[in-house]
Amino acid sequence: MKINFTNKEYRLLLDMVEIAEWVLNAHKTASSDEIKKYSDLYQKILSYAKDMGFENLIIYDKNLDGYFATSEYEESEHMRYIEEFEDDVFWDALPHRLAVRDLVKEVGEKKYEEMEFVERATKLVELESIYYKELEENGIDNLRFENQSPSDMTDLH
């Protein structure tokens, strides 16, 4: 199969695969065999950047044997979508994780795991709504760690 892209379409494809690559690898500390097929395709798509006139966005590093985004590309519009995604994930995941923590603490891990789905979901939604409301009104301003006081923290200045 052969697919022809205009420069504009290739640039959009570049943004899309960069977003996908970010989701797959941004928080990983080591490469993974299970996502190698995605990374290989990502590299293949990046390898056409120069031919498509985007050598200012993607460079090849001989020492690392791979294609990489330039700082110019890392500051382009697609990063806005990545930042929005990460922000949304944070604000959605935090209330849920806090609710799970609290419910497990309240009923115990064994009972939590044995709970019927509807019962567990109902209790989690109740707890999540408390956290959603708090976070919506105050952000993380009231978030504290019980075992840490400001004097225990490393001096950041």
Image (spheres, helix red, strand yellow):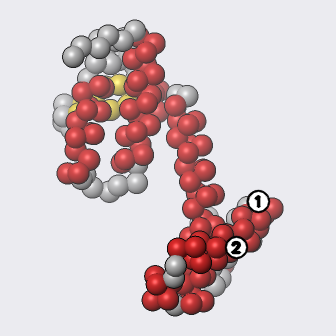
Q: Which mark is residue 41?
A: none
| Residue found at the far right of this picture | 137
**At x 61% / y 82%, what residue is drawn?**
102
**At x 35% / y 25%, what residue is drawn?**
58
Residue topped by disc 2? 126
Circle 1 residues within 10 Å: few <14, some 14–19, many ≥20 = few
Q: Inspect the image, locate mark 2, and give the three-letter code of the amino acid beneath it.
A: Glu
Q: Is residue 77 visible?
A: yes
Residue topped by disc 1? 136
Tally of numbered tags: 2
**Placement of the C terminus among the 4 image quadrants:** bottom right
**Placement of the N terminus among the 4 image quadrants:** top left
Badge 2 marks a residue whose secondary structure is helix
Residue 18 at what x, y percent from top left? 40, 34
Q: Is residue 117 above or below residue 18?
A: below
Q: Is residue 48 above or below residue 145?
A: above
Say left or right for 58 vs 74: left
Q: Inspect the image, locate mark 1, and give the three-letter code of the amino acid beneath it.
A: Glu
Q: Is residue 99 visible?
A: no
Instruction: Specify the quadrant of the image occupied by residue 122.
Output: bottom right
Say left or right for 85 vs 21: right
Tell me, yes or no, whether the two marked residues, 1 and 2, touch with CB atoms within 8 Å: no
Closest to the observer, 111 or 40: 111
Closest to the observer, 114 or 126: 114
Residue 81 at what x, y percent from top left? 56, 37
